[in-house]
Image (cartoon, rainbow, N blue to C red):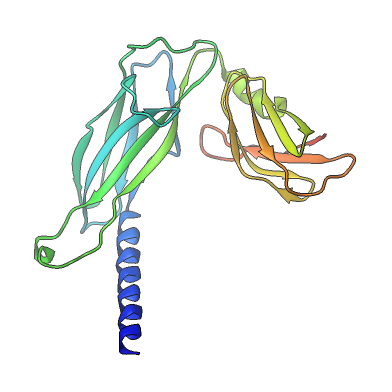
Amino acid sequence: MIFKNKIIETIVLIIGMMSVSLSTQAGVSLGTTRVVFPIDKEQVILPVSTSLDEDAYLIQSWIENKDGERSDQFVITPPLFMMQGKKENNLLILNKKNVELPKDRESLFWVNVKSIPASDKKDADKKILQFSITNRIKMFYRPEGLLKALEEAPNKLEFSIANNSLTIKNPSPVFVTIVQLKINDNELNNIMVEPLGQANIPIKFSLKSTNEVSYETINDYGSMTPRNTKKI
């Protein structure tokens, strides 16, 4: 019984330390939910801020391609720096232009910003469980002349059903992130469809002879666009 109580106490202690750590690192945030890198720009800025006066973090940043592999197409600077107390710093994302990217559609990259909590000297002899947290957001490299396509993309999505699967075709040259997706009253997972591409979502519920798909999309500001409804 004593052994069992010790286990429970240990679990509670670990959960408590996890809660404190995760809450603390919630003090590090990015200034946007996505980055747009226009083709005619040499660089863009990503703000990083901390909201707690007493904490310090080591901030590590890097860029990945759409497959999650480290990319040398863009460089982010400073790649490593310390943030102490409540303040805001800017990360600078530069295009090295060492690879020719498509000019007729968007390209996807990922911006990663890891916050590592600094250890307090007075706690050096203590066993404290700490976590680093990585904020990972999309970066769209955008050619010129796509403004109209961005506005029209949500309504141009094409939906079809076959073999218990929903196929979504995106005829636009921009990425479309679909949220609040439903067939009739059945919810489906959020999904991003690449430019001039398609995506498939399995259907695990019964369908009618005529079905209705409804959805919203995410715009450049991280907000949801007006809801669309289509018969399929």
Query: Is residue 109 toward the left or the right of residue 59 in the image?
Result: right
Query: Which quarter of the rendering shows the N terminus?
Result: bottom left
Query: Is residue 154 toward the left or the right of residue 91 in the image?
Result: right
> Residue at horizontal 21%, vertical 65%?
128
Q: Of 44 and 11, which appears nearest the observer?
A: 11
Q: Of 20 and 227, which appears nearest the observer?
A: 20
x and y percentages locating residue 202 in the rendered image:
69, 41
Q: Quadrant of residue 164?
A: top right
> Residue at horizontal 48%, vertical 12%?
102
Query: Which quarter of the rendering shows the C terminus?
Result: top right
Query: Is residue 130 toward the left or the right of residue 141 in the image?
Result: left
Residue found at the very far right of the displayed protein: 209
Q: Of 175 and 204, which appears nearest the observer?
A: 204
x and y percentages locating residue 188 in the rendered image:
67, 45
Judge whether 174 appears above or below 81 on screen: above
Does residue 226 appear anywhere in the picture? no
Does residue 219 appear anywhere in the picture? yes
x and y percentages locating residue 118 in the rendered image:
18, 53
Q: Of 215 and 16, which appears nearest the observer?
A: 16
> Residue at horizontal 67%, vertical 20%?
171
Judge whether 64 appears above or below 215 on screen: above
